[in-house]
Image: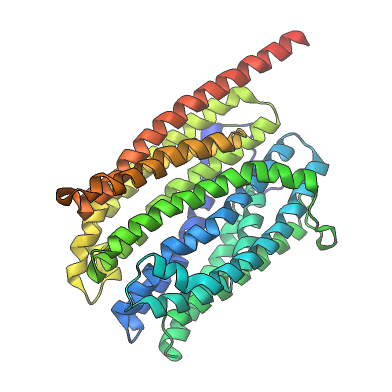
Amino acid sequence: MRRSDVDMIHGPLLKNVLVYTIPIILTSLLQLLFNAADLIIVSRYSEIKSIAMAAVSATGSITTLIVNMFIGLSVGGGVRVAHAYGAQDSEEAHKTVHTAILFAVLSGIFVTFVGMTFCETFLTWMGTPDTVLPLSATYMRFYFAGAISMMVYNFGASILRAVGDSKRPLYFLAIAGVLNVLLNLIFVIVFKMDVDGVALATTISQTVSAALVVLALMHRDDACRLFIKDLRIHKEQFLKMLKIGIPAGIQGSIFSISNVIIQSSINSFGDIAMRGNGAASNIEGFVWNIMNAFQQTALNFIGQNMGAKNYGRLRKIMWTCLGCVTVAGLVFGNAAYLAGDKLLGIYITDMPEAIPYGLLRMSFLAAPYFLCGTMDVMTGALRGAGRSVSAMVITIAGVVGIRIVWIFTIFQIPQFHTLRSLYFSYPISWAVTLIIEFVYFMVVTGKLKKQNALGAVVE
């Protein structure tokens, strides 16, 4: 085990969880700063401030929808590596790593083609106003030009985290993050670019982070070391990766579909509502990324312990991660809401009438955000235990199902056709899904412990 790797199978659980999770939190926040830097810089320094910011904000749901399917497959690669690493199966780990990285390149090529070719069509389907559609399309084309780098970084970082190394993805993204901000300022202020400049800066910085992750994998001294000449799709490992990754990807994509539908509903309230919603959503993203780090922790800790057949540790990991994410969600979610005026003012500089719209969203989403965090931890726990299909079904039914039904029923009633009613569907869907996932995980771990005890008796 490398010095940078956290021992997920032995040692004090709470300490190891925190040591492992904090770098993921910082990594996620830096990654989010890519988009935040785009929004802040175009809102302050672009010659078309409000329109440019609305254009960037309008692309969030659709870019996430396109990318999420393939990012979900990186989860499958990470879980399979964690299982192999925990079981000390060097051959399985080696084949999975090389399959995952090659697939990352191939999927990046596909996403680039789809995103750049159909961006205007997707934006039109979402009801994007004509005032921002051309700029939004320009931003998306530049953004998807870096899809290969985005995929390689996410797949590579997933592999490093699966074996306990959550620090180096942080270092790499810190370098790329500083570069992104510098390039944003240069392109927008010096070269007088707008959305094309910030998107180009993001693409360049993502390429740097991807290159650093690849180099890190090439210099490992264990079964996860990457050899370019060994890159190939190993059928058995690929199918195992798909078994976990496809449900995760489908879940992410369908989850994004509900957000696209909601964004379309928000668009119907006009540019001011879009502006306030976009700024609030970006602020909430910081809180979500802090909480989502514990989902990745639950996934990889449980994944390695599943590989080692250390079933007695699974519920302890779940409770530890649930406790940590609840505290994080309550503290940061409510802090964001209480400081909402000032935080929204950072993004909204020339349209103060949009701030109340942002505060309305935060009152329904940021304050009870811990529910979303606990739900995500349970999703990660189920995936780590190999129950990715079950996690997908529960989440789609509980989150996406409730929101879509809400939009096409309650939201259509005239007195409930308001933003307040629309946002209320979020906490309801989180709570219902959390309860179902928790009960199912307890059933799964109970069966695993009984099977393990029975096996020991037979031996």
Residue 398 figure quarter: top left
Q: Please report the residue visible at 57 percent of the width from the left and 40 percent of the height from the top.
A: 299
Question: Residue at position x 54%, y 65% from top?
Answer: 174
Quadrant of the snapshot with the C terminus: top right
Q: Nearer the viewer, residue 275 or 39?
A: 275
Note whether 389 is above or below 250 in the view shown.
above
Asked if residue 98 is positioned above or below residue 55 in the image, the reply reads above
* Residue 283 horizontal/vertical position (percent): 34, 59
Q: Nearer the viewer, residue 338 or 265?
A: 265
> The N terminus lies in which quarter of the figure?
top right
Residue 268, horizontal then vertical, whole percent:
26, 64
Residue 245 locus on image (x, y percent): 62, 46
Quick check: can you spot residue 209? no
* Residue at left offset 60%, top offset 40%: 300
Task: Report the residue that reaches farthest toward the bottom.
Answer: 191
Q: Residue furthest top?
A: 457
* Name of the residue lying farthest toward the right: 229
172 horizontally vs 234: left or right = left
Identity of the residue drawn at 35% across and 84% down: 46
State the residue in front, 25 or 145: 145
